[in-house]
Amino acid sequence: MVKIGVLISGGGTNLQAIIDGCENNTIKGNVKVVISNKEDAYGLQRAKNHDIKAIFEKEEDKIIQILKENEIDLVVLAGYLKIISPKLVNEYRNRIINIHPSLIPAFCGKGYYGEKVHQGVIDYGAKVTGATVHFVDEGADTGPIIMQKTVEVKQDDDSKKLAARVLKVEHEILTKSISMFCENKLTVDGRRVYIND
Ligand code: GRF
């Protein structure tokens, strides 16, 4: 079984989707540790509810140490609001997965996180948005894309309503991407990710 480490900063609904996927066996893996850079992140409570190690840690060197101690095979950034260092990227090349709530390369990178993403979509007048799962490289939201799924922008949307619809799609494609990783169905070739489903 693939040992998964999840990094969070907030409520952890993506984390919950991963935990549920492992428990119902759609993900052939186990969440061994959850690490948050925010002490009050509810995602830490979600981990404790499932007897999963939950650690508040901001120092990246200590985070790497925790990942190594737990023999983590796959790192998932699930609502983790920090750019990780080249050191961590190198330690886990093409073994770090991130979820972003837009169709990368639109509405991503510096300053685009959480509600700001959806407000940007609405302010721009975009008709379609969505979510993206990608491997993490040295940039912000720039690594090879694994999966994307679209979400229609409705005329009466505000950022909260749109965020809620996109969040459901995040859970769906994040768990599917992790499931495929755990079953060795993903091949990275430069910027391209091939799915051998
Ligand atoms: C999600 O939209 C995620 O993409 C963003 O933060 C929101 C909440 O994520 N980074 P979660 O509920 O903490 O998983």
Image: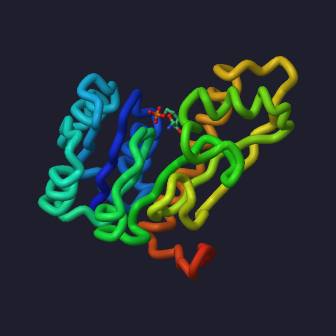
Please state which of residues 194 and 91 is positioned toward the viewer in this rendering.
91
* Placement of 85 over or under 52, stated as above or below: below
Query: Along the horizontal axis of the image, is 110 left or right of 128?
Result: left
Residue drawn 58% across and 38% down?
A: 112
Is 38 placed left or right of 62 in the picture?
Answer: right
Q: Residue furthest front?
A: 110
Figure disc tally = 0
> Which quadrant is the C terminus positioned in?
bottom right
The color scheme shown is rainbow
| Image quadrant assignment for residue 57 | top left
Residue 61 occupies which quadrant of the picture? Answer: bottom left
Q: Is residue 29 visible?
A: yes
Of residue 75 and residue 19, the one placed in the foreground of this image is: 75
Residue at horizontal 27 percent and vertical 23 percent from the top: 40
Q: Tell me which residue sits at (49%, 63%) in the image.
A: 135
In the rendering, at what x and y percent does residue 120 appear?
Answer: 71, 32
Q: Position of residue 13 (x, y in %)?
A: 45, 33
Q: Quadrant of the N terminus?
A: bottom left
Q: Can you say whether 130 is above or below 157 in the image?
A: below
Whether residue 197 is visible here, answered yes or no, is: no
As drawn, is 17 to the left or to the right of 125? left
Residue 161 rendering spot, x and y as whole percentages: 69, 21
Q: Quadrant of residue 35?
A: top left
Image x and y of residue 171, in percent? 54, 42
* Residue placed furthest toward the bottom: 189
